[in-house]
Image (cartoon, rainbow, N blue to C red):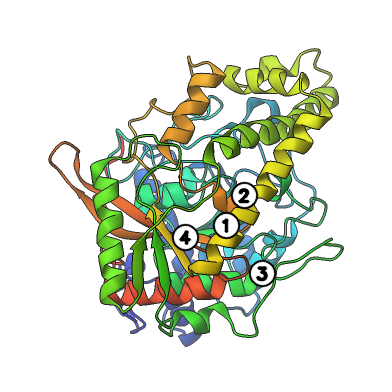
Amino acid sequence: MTTASDTPCHAGFADYEAYDATGLAALVRAGEVTADELLDAALSRIAAHEPGLHALVHRFEERGRQAVAEGLPKGPFTGVPFLLKNTGFEMEGTILSTGSNLFKDAVSNRDSTLVARYKAAGLVIIAKTNTPEFALSFTTEPDAFGPTRNPWNPELSPGGSSGGSTSAIAAGYVPMANTSDGAGSTRVPASHCGLFGFKPSRMVNPLGPVVVEAIAGMSTPHAASWSVRDNATLLDASGGPDIGDPYLSPVGAESYLSQVERDPPPLRIGFAPDSPLGTPVDPECRRVAEEAARLCAELGHHVEICEAGYDAHALKAAWRIVVGVNITPAVEMRGRALGLADPLGHIEPVNAEWVREARTLPAAAYLGAVNMLHQTARSLGRFFQSYDVLLSPTAAELPPPLGKLAGAGKSLDAFYDAFWTHAPFTCAFNASGCPAMSVPLGMSSGGGSPAGLPIGAHFGAGFGKDGLLFRLAGQLERARPWFGRRPSVVSR
């Protein structure tokens, strides 16, 4: 592959970052390197850049060392170090604080289904990554832990809510890491950190064993990575229904990895470069999307300007209701468990305002919001009767300065408007459950914007068409490889 070497490495293990996770696992299988040596390599990079980048918040490398000593399962990633996002993913005996002081001492008493599958794939889980409180921001700056910095420029945010994971990958701690995506929270930080970020179709990856769905089915777990093949192989290992799931996503007979290796047929690609909210799009973000459209045309696909045809303003209003109503019971339940008279005094002010707003809403408002999500799914379903893929910018803005998108000092209205202005393209794929990805196809060129910052192009497809997107991603990666394009990490 053009993404990473499969050739054995003989220089100690200084070449850790020259391999993707698939390549590292191949070295372990071949006896060229041990899992302990991979763990040492990961920890040396963490030691070099933490706490400067502040990508990690709960570390337990001794658990990883113990797992290696006890013998790892034979899987596609045996011996490869891995990170979990600090929200929604339980690992027995570790803290799951969700970026909040309210949950700072919450310890999981079991592994979630997804974590169990990660372990069965041979991954060595060593830490949890920073996330905004309750994963409700496109920047990773929780009051409980402080900001995560972007390895491409430490004055900037890596995005959110999976910013800790994407910062860690970009800094070379691990070749891929767990993320989740409720409005773009995998794809937006992947764009800002120069990575491949994939949001699968709803319920390809399960949220069990207890939770069925999060934020009315909009939150979808998976990963960001340097290579497309790592991302596909991980989904092959983690995907599939869980016991008791009330519904599931269609799964094809072929593995996702096998589809990465084959070009797609000529596709009908609709290109929507303008914000569906009518808000500004940075010229650099538009330029990269336009270059992606030209690349697709060069590869034999039919590309034409279009509109996606869903009501983005109504979706924006609905998302606010659904999220507020979903976080409220978790906050109140935690408050009761801790005996707190006022749990809102233990969360960030903007999120406390969100909870107070949700408490005033009638049940009919929530039902109406959920129905709006379904209307978005219907609209995209009709769109994908005419097109195979929808192409747009991933975000409407470059990686933001720290503080710009944070909730501190802002009203809920101001925070929420900034959130949607930053990334108006991605949430429709959460509302609909359709798969989508950010592909790191460009860099900012300067002029009126800082030069040398990564910019992703966004591609989405119809429900259950995850394999089609992986085929397109593999084709784009072969045409414009990005694996060697790394930041000069600066930490402080």
Q: Which residue is mark 2?
A: 376
Q: Position of residue 137 (x, y in %)?
A: 52, 34
Tag 1 near tag 2, CB within 8 Å: yes
Q: Which residue is mark 4?
A: 437
Q: Amino acid at mark 2?
A: Thr
**How many residues crowd mark 3 within 10 Å: few (<14), some (14–19), many (20+)?**
some
Q: Say which element carries label 1.
A: helix
Mark 3–mark 2 Cα distance, whole angstroms, equals 25 Å
Q: Amino acid at mark 3?
A: Gly
Mark 1–mark 2 Cα distance, whole angstroms, equals 6 Å
In the picture provided, is 452 more to the left or to the right than 200?
Answer: left
Q: Say which element carries label 4.
A: strand
Mark 4–mark 3 Cα distance, whole angstroms, equals 17 Å
Mark 2–mark 4 Cα distance, whole angstroms, equals 18 Å
Q: Position of residue 392 (x, y in %)?
A: 39, 54
Front residue of this view, candidates 143 and 35 = 143
**How many residues crowd mark 2 within 10 Å: few (<14), some (14–19), many (20+)?**
many
User: Is the residue 252 above or below the residue 17 in the image?
Assistant: below
Q: Amino acid at mark 4?
A: Met
Q: Say which element carries label 2.
A: helix
In primary-sequence order, the first of circles 2 and 4 is 2
Residue found at x 36% / y 42%? 396
Front residue of this view, candidates 449 and 287 = 287
Q: Quadrant of residue 55?
A: top left
Mark 3–mark 1 Cα distance, whole angstroms, equals 24 Å
